[in-house]
Each structure stands twice: as structure tokens, then as C-alpha cells.
Image (tube, rainbow, N blue to C red):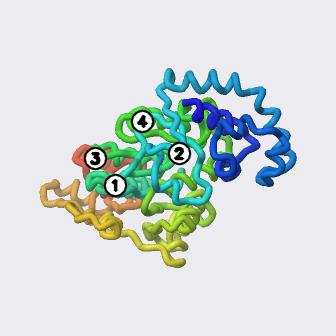
């Protein structure tokens, strides 16, 4: 407990990164040893810059405050897991810049396959459906789903895993006592009982822009493979994929139309050698898991539909169409078309997005 308190003190020092903490720990063999070492000995070690040595010596005065914070973690339902503990995920130890410690609400992933599912925050409705379905099928086959709890693809992946009764892990760019974005609070609450929310940043750390590229290495580091569902040419999802590649993870991408800006990142990854993922079976096969139920993106059985419902359904696509376009193609009165669309939506045949856009449900 004393060693972990000293590690907490080190991790609260913003001028020290994960690699620096690991290197000075390896040199001095204990976290308490780092605290008790003299300034000259720190300089002789040659690990930290001169400025960092001075800052670390000055930081010793903050230890009583840090110790008090550390003792209150359990009162907030937060576990603090050091890199030296058995509970620390083995996968993370295989990457170069793994965090020296993790703050956790829930249970950390250990054995068993895991896949990181990432993509655009401003995703399409069909992309959101795909992410949710991929995660649902993977989770129902015992695969842990890792993502960043962001809006869009991340949230859809967490939702799909939870609906399947699986475990999912949200890696935050802030303290684990903060739900960011607030819109995903329900997911945040649920995954603490079916997985965890995890961060290398201490409680109360704000969701600063610089934190998110840092957390991406943990998303890919906790997984066996990275799946990108939708991504622009320059995006955080591609950074996660690149980090995963550097870490020796397999990269999968869902292909899309060449004219779709949300598919350019995925198509680029495939062009560069990433595996094409057209169904969860592609990923499960790589993981060596026998597939139980294949996802097929195809027409639903429409034989049971009435004539007008069938006409409206056939004119739709998996990419949402605006109501005006549906009215032009079907030539139905507005009230009648709206009534038919509502029946199709209630029957699970179509989905509705904002501003009167409708698409076929996968």
C-alpha cells in the first residue's frame, strides 16, 4: 500500500510521463526509493532532465496531500492498480509506453480475447448500426469490447456489447470519476458492472484535448485487434490504428463507398494492408473463435408487409433518405407515407434519424 501511495504521488506529477516513471522505477527498484533518493543521485541516474530533477525534488512537498487523495480513492469506488501488480493487464505490459498505474471503476480485463472498436464521432446512422452489431456479435462470442466512450462509433460499440451481456471497457481522457461526454452517462454507469471505465489520469483530471491521443495507445494496447468502422482521412481513429500496428495488433476496417468522406479513412487502411471486415466472422476467424451466428447485411423478409409498406420499404436504402425523396419516389400523400414509415419503424424494418431521414435497418 505504501509503494502504491508513492506511485500515486509520482503519477500526480504532470511533468513526468509514463516512460520516465517506468525508467526511474527500474533504476531505483522501488517507488519509495525514488521519493527518498537525494537530488544528486537523481542527476547521476541520467534519466530525467535537469529541470525535471528540480521539479521532482520540489514535488516531494506535495506528498502529504497526494497521500490523503490516495486514501480517499476507495470511498469514490475507484481502484488504483500499479504496473507491478498481478491485476495489471498483461497485454498493456507488452507496449513500450504503458501507464505506470491505472485508475479503474469496475474490473480490469485479463484473459480472453478483446477487440478495440473505434470510429468517427460524427458517424452516419448506418455506421452506428454496424458498430453496434459488430460489437454485439463479438461480445456474444466472448470477446471483450474496448473503446473510448466517445459519441458516435465508440458509444455504439459499448452499447452493442452491453446488449449482448458482454464486457466492455471505456478508456477515458479524463479522471474516471468524470463521464465525458455527459451524453454517454448511462453507458458509463452500466459498464462499471460489465467491464470498466479506465484512465491513467487521476480523479478530477479534466478532459483536455492533449489527453485523448495519449489514451488511444491504451485502447489499442488492451486489445488483440483494432476494428475501424468509419473514419475520415485524418482522425483519431487512424491514430489508434497506427498505434495498434506499432504494438503488433491486427487492424481491421469496414469498407465503404469511395465517395463517402466517412469511409476514406477505412478505405485508406485497407489500401495500406489492413484486413477488410465485412462481418464479425472475419474478426472471430482471426481470433480462432467458432462463429455462432453470421451477420448478413441484406433485405429483411418483406413478404408479410402490406402493398404500400412494401413499396416504401423497397425505395429505401441502408443510407438514410429524406422524407421528400421518399414522397417523390412513392407518390404517396404525406400523411399516408408518414403512417407507413411509422409502421415499418415499429416493425423493426427501418430506422429514423433527425430531420426526417429514414433508412433500412441492418
Q: Which residue is mark 4?
A: 106
Nearest to N terminus: mark 3 or mark 1: 1
Horizontal and vertical percent for residue 87?
A: 44, 43
Relative height, residue 110 to residue 175 (above, below): below
Residue visible at 37% across and 58% down in the picture: 130
3 vs 1, front mark: 1
Within 10 Å of the Cα at label 4, are there few (<14), some (14-19), or many (20+) other Cα atoms? many
In the picture provided, is 6 more to the left or to the right than 361?
A: right
Q: Which residue is mark 1?
A: 112
In the image shown, does 254 or 194 lie closer to the viewer? 194
Q: Are marks 1 and 2 in contact (CB under 8 Å)?
A: no
Q: Which residue is mark 3?
A: 164
Horizontal and vertical percent for residue 358?
A: 38, 52
Instruction: Tell me, for residue 84, which label it has, or none.
Output: 2
Disc 1/disc 2 C-alpha distance (Å): 21 Å
Relative height, residue 284 to residue 358 (above, below): below
In the image shown, does 140 or 126 lie closer to the viewer? 140
Residue visible at 54% across and 68% down in the picture: 245
Amino acid at each position: 500500500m505504501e509503494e502504491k501511495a508513492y506511485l500515486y504521488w509520482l503519477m500526480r506529477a504532470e511533468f513526468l510521463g509514463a516512460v520516465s516513471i517506468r525508467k526511474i522505477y527500474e533504476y531505483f527498484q522501488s517507488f519509495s526509493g525514488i521519493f527518498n533518493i537525494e537530488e544528486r543521485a537523481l542527476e547521476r541516474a541520467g534519466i530525467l532532465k535537469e529541470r525535471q530533477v528540480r521539479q521532482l525534488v520540489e514535488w516531494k512537498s506535495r506528498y502529504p496531500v497526494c497521500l490523503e487523495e490516495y486514501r480517499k480513492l476507495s470511498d469514490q469506488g475507484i481502484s488504483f492498480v500499479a504496473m507491478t501488480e498481478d491485476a495489471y493487464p498483461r497485454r498493456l505490459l507488452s507496449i513500450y509506453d504503458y501507464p505506470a498505474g491505472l485508475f479503474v471503476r469496475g474490473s480490469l480485463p485479463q484473459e480472453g480475447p478483446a477487440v478495440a472498436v473505434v470510429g468517427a464521432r460524427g458517424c452516419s446512422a448506418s455506421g452506428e448500426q454496424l458498430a453496434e452489431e459488430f460489437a454485439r456479435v463479438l461480445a456474444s462470442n466472448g470477446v471483450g469490447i474496448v473503446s473510448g466512450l466517445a459519441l458516435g462509433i465508440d458509444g455504439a460499440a459499448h452499447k452493442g456489447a452491453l446488449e449482448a451481456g458482454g464486457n466492455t471497457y471505456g478508456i477515458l481522457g479524463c479522471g474516471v470519476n468524470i463521464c465525458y461526454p455527459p451524453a454517454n452517462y448511462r453507458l458509463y454507469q452500466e459498464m462499471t458492472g460489465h467491464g470498466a471505465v479506465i484512465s491513467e489520469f487521476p480523479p478530477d483530471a479534466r478532459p483536455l484535448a492533449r489527453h485523448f491521443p495519449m489514451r488511444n495507445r491504451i485502447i489499442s494496447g488492451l486489445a488483440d485487434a483494432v476494428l475501424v468502422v468509419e473514419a475520415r482521412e485524418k482522425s483519431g481513429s487512424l491514430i489508434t490504428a497506427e498505434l495498434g500496428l506499432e504494438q503488433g495488433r491486427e487492424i481491421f476496417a469496414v469498407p465503404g463507398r469511395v465517395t463517402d468522406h466517412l469511409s476514406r479513412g477505412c478505405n485508406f487502411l485497407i489500401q495500406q494492408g489492413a484486413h477488410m471486415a465485412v462481418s464479425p466472422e472475419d474478426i472471430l476467424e482471426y481470433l480462432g473463435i467458432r462463429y455462432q451466428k453470421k451477420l448478413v447485411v441484406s433485405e429483411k423478409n418483406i413478404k408479410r408487409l402490406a402493398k404500400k409498406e412494401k413499396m416504401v420499404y423497397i425505395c429505401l436504402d441502408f443510407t438514410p433518405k429524406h422524407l421528400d425523396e421518399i414522397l417523390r419516389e412513392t407518390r404517396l400523400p404525406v400523411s399516408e407515407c408518414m403512417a407507413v414509415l411509422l409502421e415499418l419503424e415499429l416493425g423493426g424494418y427501418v430506422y429514423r434519424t433527425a430531420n426526417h431521414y429514414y433508412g433500412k435497418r441492418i
